[in-house]
Amino acid sequence: MSGKPSLIHWFHKGLRVHDNPALTDIFEQARAHPSSYNVRPIYILDSGVTEWTKIGANRWRFLQESLEDLHGQLEALGSRLYVIRGSPSTVFPRLFKEWRVEVLTFEEDIEPYALKHGAAVKELAKATNVTVKTHYSHTIYNPHSILRNNENKAPLTYQKFLEIVKTLEQSKPLEKPKSLRNLNLNKPEEDSCEKEDIQCYDIPLLDELVKSKEELGVNKFRGGETEALERLNKVLADEKWVIEFEKPNTKPNSLEPSTTALSPYLSFGCLSSRYFCQRLTDTLTRCPNHTKPPASLMGQLMWREFFYAAATYEPNFDRMMGNSFCLQIPWLSNVNHLEAWTFGRTGYPFIDAIMRQLRKEGWIHHLARHAVACFLTRGDLWISWEEGEKVFEELLLDQDWALNAGNWMWLSASAFFYKYFHVYSPVAFGKKTDRSGSYIRKYVPELAEYPGDKIYEPWKVSLADQRAYGCVLGSDYPHRIVNHELEYKENIKRMSAAYKVNREVRTGKSEEDNADGTRKRKNKTSSKQSVKKKKV
C-alpha cells in the first residue's frame, strides 16, 4: 500500500482519551510531523476466543456503547476508531505491512490473555522493524514498582501495601491529546479491506455482539468515557458524602446504588483511576476531616491497587491449584446447588435477589457480593470459589481479572482473610438495612405479597398463609436448598480441618489435641530422632 506510514495505538481496556499516555504518544508524534504520518487508533474484536465467549450480554452492550463513545471522542480530535475483527496474531502482520506501520503503542496489562497476545505482537513488531511503546495506566501505580519496593514480592497485607505506596511517586494524569484537526491532515487512504467493504472497520452494532437479546437487562450503566466523567463529577460534587464515606455503612440492598457505581468504568478503562485519585485527593485536601482507608473512598481505590499487585506477582491468581497465596481446600462439587445459586433459586430470598439483580443489571453492591460469595463457599454450599468467579466473570460489568479472583479468595477465606468463622447470615445480614424487604420484592417478585417480618424466611410461613400471599413454596418459589443453621456450623469444622492440613504442609509439623482441648505441636520425626538431633 502506498501513502504515508502509520502510527497505531491499540486499545485494550483503556477506552478513553483522557489520561491515556500511549494514545497521547502517537498524537504528539503526529503533531510534531504533521505531514509525515497517518494516525490509526484500533480496537481488535477477537470474539472467537475462549476469553471473549465468557462475556455476558450486558457486558457486551457496555463494551459496544464504550466503543461508540470512544469513536466519537476520537472524531472530535480529528481521528477515528478502527475496529478490526480477528485475532492479534493474524491481524497485525497485515496491518504492519499494508498500513506501513512505524510505531505501535498500547497500555500494558497483567491479565494472562493480554500478556500472551502482547508478547506475541511485540515479536511480530520486532520482526518487521515496528517500534513498540507501552505504558502502565490502568492502575494508579505501576504494579511492578510495588513489587520492586517489596523485595520483588507482593505485599500480603493491606497495611503493608499502604506503607509501600507512600514511598512511591504518583504519576499525574494527562489531559486528552491535542486535536489533530487544526493540522489539516488528509484522511488515510483506503486499504484492501475498506476497498472491499467501506464499513469493515465500523463500530459493531449490538446485534453483532449480542445474539440472545432476551439476556439483556435494564441498562442502568451506559458505557463510555462521557458517561464515566459525568458520573464522577456528580459523585464528587457531594463533598459531604465523599468525606464521610465508609464502605461498611453503605447498603448492600438499596434499590439504587449506595456507592459510586464507577467500578464498571474503571474496569473498562473509560475512567482513569489516576484521574479519579487526583480529583478525590483534591477534595480530601480541602476537607481534612475525612474517613480513612480501608473503609474510605480512597481506601476502595487502594484495594484495587492491592489486588493488582498480588495478581502481577502470581500468574495463577485466578485458580486454587498452583496459587502461592491460596489455601488448598477440598471443596465439593454439586451441579444442582451451583445452578440454583447462579440463577437465584436457592430458596433464600436475600441471596436470590442479589443473584437476580446481578443477572439483570450486571452490578451488585460489594457487600452483596460478600453475602453470595460466602453462601456459595464456606458459608453454606461448600462449592469452590472458582465456580463463583466464573459466574461473576460472565455477568459483572466491572469484572476485572485481578479484583474478581482476589475478592473470591478473600470471601472464601482462601487468602488474605482468615477469620473463616465469621459467616454472613443469608437472613440477618439483609434485614439489617432493609427490614421491610423492598429489595427482595423488586428482584424476587414471587414474594411481593409477603409481609416484611416473613419475606426473609418464607419456609416459616404456613401453607395457608403461603396461598394467601400468592406464593407457595415448591411450586411458585423453591424450598431452601440447605439449612443454613446446620450447614455453616459443619462448614466451620471443615474450614478448621483444611486450615490444619495447610498449616502442617507449610510448617512440616502435625498437631494433636491436648487433654484440655488446646493444641500442641509435634514434629513429624520420631521422638528418638528429635533426641538425636538435639545431641548433635
Image (tube, rainbow, N blue to C red):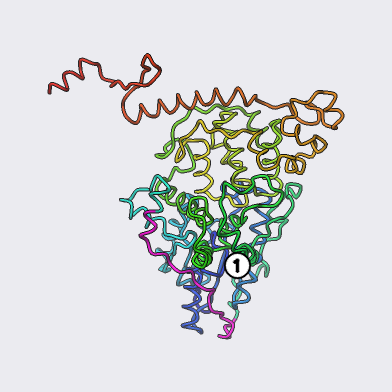
What is the magenta range? 163-186
Q: Is residue 472 left or right of residue 113?
A: right
- Residue located at (59% from left, 29% from top): 380
Camera-side residue: 348 or 217?
Answer: 348
Note whether residue 83 is visible.
Answer: no
Find residue 197 and report its image quarter: bottom right
Location of residue 485 with respect to 439 vertically, above or below: above
Residue 426 position in % (x across, y down): 64, 33
Callout 1 amino acid:
Tyr
- Neighbourhood count class around disc 1 (C-alpha, 10 Å): few under 14, some 14–19, many 20 upward: many
User: Which percent across, then down, holds residue 365?
Assistant: 62, 47
Question: Which residue, as the protein is rendered here, is positioned at the far right?
Answer: 468
Furthest-front residue in view? 289
Q: Quadrant of the N terminus?
A: bottom right
Residue at the image point whose x is 54% and y is 31% from the top? 378
Residue at image location 86% in from the left, 28% down from the top: 467
Residue 535 is left or right of residue 361, and the answer is left
413, 338: nearer the viewer: 413
Estimate the x, y position of residue 104 in percent, counting from the top left.
47, 68
Tag count in the figure? 1
Rendering coords of residue 21 (x, y %): 48, 69
Asked which secondary structure carries label 1, the reply is: strand
Q: If the image is split into quadrants, where does the C terminus sit?
A: top left
**Is 432 a magenta residue?**
no
Tell me if residue 403 comes above or below residue 526 in the rendering: below
Q: Residue at x 87, y 29 (%)?
A: 468
Which residue is under mark 1? Answer: 82
The kind of secondary structure the magenta stretch mainly shows is loop
Judge whether residue 325 can be spotted in this image.
yes
